Amino acid sequence: MQPRRSRPYAAGRALVTGVAAALALAACGTAAAPQPGETSLAAGPVRAVTDQPVEADGALRCPESVGSVDLSKPAAVPQKPQGVDGAARLLPDRDPASVVVCGYPVVDIMATTPLSPPFRLAKRSVASESQRAALVEAMTWAPRVTGGPGVCTLMAGNETAYLVGAAYGDAIVWVSALADANACSTSTNGDFPSGPGPAVVLDQMFGTRTPPPEAVAACSRSSWGRLGDDQTLAPTGDPTVTVCRDSVDGTVRATQLDAAPSAQVTAALRALPTKPTDQTCQGSDKTSDARFALVLAYAVGPAVRINVDPACTPSVLGSGLESQDAGSLVDLVEQWSPPIPAPDPNGSVSSDGSVAPPATAPDATVPTEVPGSTGGGAGGTTGIEPATPTEIPMTK
């Protein structure tokens, strides 16, 4: 990113820092030693708040350009978090006075000449009250990323680098995110690394992505993770659990659990031994009828989606962690959501996933006369077009 030119900013157009001298400049202690599968939660530095340029509308000024970016390294933030512990969350869990969103196109698949750094500012938007609330929720609960990037699709598409500047009365936080066609990028405030979720939300609000329908079934809810999912499969809270199973006809059977069963499933998830995940498993039978997903919906913040497949190793894949053995969890869940039988190649499949027994074949020793037949010998034909095989959607 090119350095900004020095300008004389009027006192009314700069953020005044009345509490900077009182802010601690060192880390505020450390948490207990992490358990297996956890990451360290040591507190980050709390930096003094400095004057940063603002526009006439009162929101922070966007940098004129950003430097090089890629999927694993979004654009550098103008300043690391000031006035708050930026290592705890992407954004503090409170309402900012203003939020500005700066967009910088970095890939344009229709351009005759590829874009190259420095990437120029194309759009500056001051978030409305509702947009501000949605952005704060998405970034406050965005999970910490552990390990390298996961498996990604390779669709070509436009990419936009975003800088989000959140100004508080006693703090300033910038967040950098890269929106790409495969939702495979990362985001950061300079201290806290996270995944693609913030970029997806930003592109839905200020870019070209089509937002999902407002009213969606629990099983259709997408999840980019939740703060704390690098510590446990079921982050802190009392979520309502929905069990989602794919029927062989492509429909989804959803079973929403009451409070008591939800608490049991949540406790079982938290008891599983875990380690960081790369979001892949080996050995899954594509016709497995025991696989399912768990959607954990919280009163505040995003849901968590956990995929379970006893025929795959590891059997449990969360947003940030995985577990090798799902035996006890599977037995528990099947009390309220029994498996859907896998398709029988010789049977018919109903819309509820049940499989009818195959029809009894006629006696092979008794010739069956077919109307329209032109002959029964080796060279004859029945006069009936061969049936087109029925395509049965595979479970996900």
Image: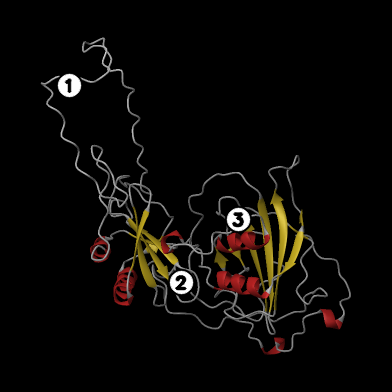
Q: What residue appears at the point 29 percent right and 77 percent down from the top-left corner?
A: 260
Which of the 4 quarters of the picture holds residue 114? top right
* Whether residue 317 is visible: no
Question: Circle 1 sits in a helix, a strand or a loop, which is it?
Answer: loop
Q: Position of residue 50 (x, y in %)?
A: 74, 79
Q: Earlier in the sequence, mark 1 or mark 3?
A: 3
Residue holding disc 3: 210
Q: Position of residue 341 (x, y in %)?
A: 25, 50
Residue holding disc 2: 228
Which of the 4 quarters of the picture holds residue 21? bottom right
In space, the residues marked 1 and 3 are separated at their CA atoms by 57 Å
Q: What residue type is labelled 3?
A: Thr
Q: Callout 2: 10 Å neighbours few (<14), some, many (20+)?
A: some
Q: Which amino acid does label 1 sit on?
A: Thr
* Quarter containing the N terminus: bottom right
Which of the 4 quarters of the picture holds residue 9? bottom right
Q: Callout 1: 10 Å neighbours few (<14), some, many (20+)?
A: few
